Structures are given as structure tokens and as C-alpha cells.
Image: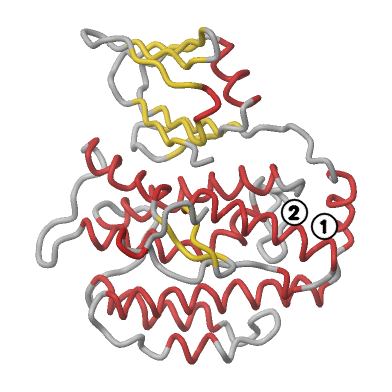
Amino acid sequence: MLRKTIEIATPGTRLSVAHRQLVIERPELPKATVPIEDLGVLVVDDGRASYTQAVFIECLAAGATVIVTGRDHLPAGMMLPMEGHHALTERHWAQVEAGAPLRKRLWQALVAAKLRQQGRVLKEAGSDDAGLTALAGRVRSGDPDNFEAQGAQRYWPRLFGRDFRRDRAADGTNALLNYGYAIVRAACARALVASGLIPSLGVWHRNRANPFCLADDLLEPWRPIVDWKVRGLCVAGETAPSLDDRRTRAALLTIFNDTILVGGKRWPLLLGIEQSAASLAKALTLNDRDALLVPESLPLQPDLVEDGAA
């Protein structure tokens, strides 16, 4: 089932639950309701919002992720469902006991997939792929040559201009990228927990203060889809739209409805991430890097999407 992504941004919104429906009450607007089981991601971007406890309990019980943003509109925290996977203990042990060779091979696959996706973005943007596809084929176990960083040096100037610098603290285009990455990272964390994995125990990322190292690993090949989305919002030669504009955030949130290829099949992006996370759990359990599924396309045009493909 394709779950919905809902953003709450009207100042003073009150959220509650009645009869398995999320009840949304906004000042001077009609009351709205959404079936709890239809929710995939709930983003609350309203510093004056109020909740009943049931909102969190019911959303999490239904498998939804709740994201709360700060004043800069970027996610400040998230709540993930903790319902146990049927093979939870087995997968936890497999993850803990995964040896360095397997973890390095998985990182190799993730980096190579990211480079291929970046090459697709550049081609769709009207450029050549800057050799990124060829670079992807040369990535070795653990990426000891740091082709991921080399790829970034080729990628960003071609995508957003020679003067662009990727800066997590900057405004403009960088702020849009930060927002897009943050919401997709949350979806990765949700999918990993649902697949019975420990989100803090990464295959490559390691930081004792980061509770989502594995989500950061899985996120890498999905980042270029955010880049492509952001590029579509940034008209050449003009200032990037502001993240303060609700329409800009809404446009970025539609990324979860885009259809992409994962494992040779078409999936809405949110479900594609779930397939990728489940395959990572399988790869760790079977000690088989080839079990990992990664995105194989950018968002497909509507006329290329078949009904019922997911």
C-alpha cells in the first residue's frame, strides 16, 4: 500500500485521534481527517502545534514515522515505530557479527550505486556523466580510493554551477538539499527498523553520537534523487526558492510518490526504500553482498509507469 506523507504547517494546528482517524484542526479552516493506517510519514512544521498522546501511539503502532522540525524547517527529531520484526533477534545478531569483508563489500555496492545515480542525474540535466558511470565500475571493497569524494568533485559543479559548494550550514540550494536528505534519511531509518535492523550500527558510518549510522549508509544511493528534485526547483540563473515557503517544502515531500526502479521493478520511492532496507537485512543475514537492492533509476515519467507495478 502506498502510504501518505502529510506536512502540518498551519500555525496553531491541533492534532488528535478519533475512530482510527488522525484529526487535524486548524484555526479558521474546516476540520480534516486522515485514516491512521494510510500514514507513512507525518511531518509537523508548526512550533505552536498541540497533540494528544494518542497521536504518537496510534501513528507509531500503524508503522508511521513522526518528524518534528525546528525553526529552520529542518527535522529536529523523529519517532520511529519499534514493533518487533518476526526475525528481529536473528537479524540483530547477523548485523552485530557481520565481518569487515562483508561490510566493506556492502559499502562498495552503496558507493557504486550512488555514483551511477549521480551520472544519471547529470545526463538528465543535459550534461555528460563526467565519467561517474565508469568510476562506479572501479570502486573496490571499502572504497579505499575514496571514489565517492572524487565523484562529488566532478558532480556538484556540473549540476549546480562552477561556484556551487556543498555546505550543510548554507542557505539557498544547500538548505533545500538538507531538507530533502533529512526526510529521506528518516524514511531509511523507518524502513531499517521495520526490517529488524539496528539503525545505529552502520556498515561504514561510525559515530558514537549518531543513532542512525546505518540509515546514513543506506541513504547514499538515494541522495541523487533528492539532488534531481532540488535541481528541478532551482531555475538556472535565479535564486533558489526559500525553504520558508510551504509550497517549496510540499514540492520536496512529493519525492515519496515518485516511481523508481529497485530490483528491476517499479516502486513508489517510499516502498522502494523499504525494499532496499529489507534486502540489506537479507544481505547481512546470508553474508551475501549481491542480495542488496539499490535504486536503479531516477524518477520515471508518468507515461513509463505501469499501473499496479508495486
Position above or below: 95 against 283: above
Say what secondary structure mark 1 lies in: helix
- Cβ–Cβ below 8 Å for labels 1 and 2? yes
Say what secondary structure mark 2 lies in: loop
Q: Position of residue 124 (x, y in %)?
A: 29, 75
Amino acid, disc 2: Leu
Q: Position of residue 96 (x, y in %)?
A: 86, 56
Q: Position of residue 76 (x, y in %)?
A: 48, 35
Image side of residue 46 versus residue 277, left or right: left
Please tell me which residue is depicted at 72% across the width and 75% down the height of the picture.
290
Q: Which mark is residue 201?
A: 2
Residue ID for mark 1: 95
The residue lying toward the viewer, choosing from 69 and 19, is 19
Image side of residue 29 versus residue 275, left or right: left
Please tell me which residue is depicted at 84% across the width and 61% down the height of the picture.
285
Amino acid, disc 1: Gln
Please tell me which residue is depicted at 40% across the width and 80% down the height of the picture.
119
Q: Position of residue 277 (x, y in %)?
A: 65, 55
